């Protein structure tokens, strides 16, 4: 399958066979503020103090703070788009203000959440959810005060239940930015949604802020 990144044209539609198109106006990206008090002192130590504020057409905002150091480690799963990451790795935090739905269409209320890397189960119940196996799971910041955790995927799922309140983790898909970027950039992902690309020295992650997979 050939993927194509569309970086500049608002409203352009990119259809990937087998996945629904998600028509959405281009969000805006501006400088954000400092770290919220809800994030623990230990976690604050590893995050950048300057935020990246994404404003959706609906008015909902997602403000991100990413790790200062590149969160690369061994242990990525088979078939992962980002094998440099291990399950449970802290990559950043986000504050959501307004109504927002995760990649599975589950509503996530306003709040502050840590972002930890996880992988979609290949168990037959999640077929068609995403082109990629890679996600970050949202964990309420008040329940996640440490940087290093010894969580497997089931543990991470349970810790993320608090973000949805329905016994399902809150998930934000990760999409690759194929052209590569040198600074934070919004781009249209493989399924026509919008993602925020954040580049470290070697690794660039695309956090899907608007778009859903099949439910």
Image (cartoon, rainbow, N blue to C red):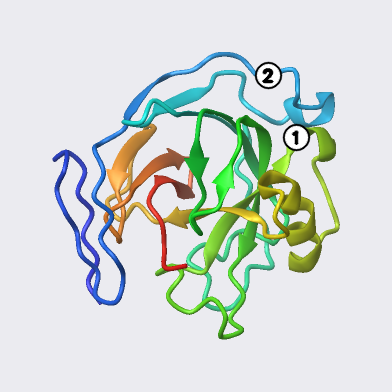
Q: Nearer the viewer, residue 98 or 126?
A: 98
Q: Residues within 10 Å of mark 2 (few under 14, many from 20)?
A: some
In percent of width and height, residue 182 lies at 35, 36
Q: Nearer the viewer, residue 72 or 25?
A: 25
Proximity of marks 1 and 2: CB atoms separated by less than 8 Å = yes
User: Residue at point 22% right, 72% down?
Assistant: 2
Q: What is the secondary structure assignment of the residue under circle 2?
A: loop
User: Residue at point 46% right, 70% down?
Assistant: 129
Viewer can see residue 200? no
In percent of width and height, residue 10 lies at 16, 38
Q: To which residue does mark 1 refer?
A: 141
User: Residue at point 42% right, 75% down?
Assistant: 128
Looking at the image, residue 65 lies above or below residue 186: above
Viewer can see residue 104? yes
Q: Is residue 73 left or right of residue 179?
A: right
Looking at the image, residue 86 lies above or below residue 205: below
Q: Nearer the viewer, residue 33 or 176?
A: 33
Q: How many marks?
A: 2
Q: To which residue does mark 2 refer?
A: 36
Looking at the image, residue 97 lies above or below residue 194: above
């Amino acid at each position: 399958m050939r993927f194509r990144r569309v970086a500049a044209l608002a409203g352009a539609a990119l259809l990937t066979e087998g996945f629904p198109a998600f028509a959405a106006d281009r969000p805006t990206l501006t400088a954000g503020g400092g770290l919220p008090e809800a994030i623990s002192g230990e976690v604050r130590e590893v995050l950048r103090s300057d935020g990246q504020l994404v404003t959706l057409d609906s008015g909902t905002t997602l403000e991100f703070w990413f790790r200062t150091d590149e969160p690369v480690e061994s242990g990525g799963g088979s078939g992962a788009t980002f094998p440099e990451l291990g399950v449970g790795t802290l990559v950043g935090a986000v504050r959501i203000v307004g109504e927002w739905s995760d990649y599975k269409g589950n509503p996530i209320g306003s709040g502050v959440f840590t972002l930890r890397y996880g992988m979609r189960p290949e168990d037959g119940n999640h077929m068609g959810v995403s082109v990629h196996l890679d996600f970050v799971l949202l964990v309420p910041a008040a329940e996640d005060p440490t940087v290093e955790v010894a969580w497997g995927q089931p543990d991470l799922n349970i810790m993320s239940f608090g973000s949805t309140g329905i016994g399902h983790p809150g998930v934000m898909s990760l999409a690759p930015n194929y052209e590569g970027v040198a600074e934070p950039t919004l781009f249209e992902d493989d399924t026509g949604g919008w993602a925020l690309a954040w580049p470290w020295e070697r690794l660039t992650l695309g956090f899907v802020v608007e778009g859903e997979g099949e439910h």
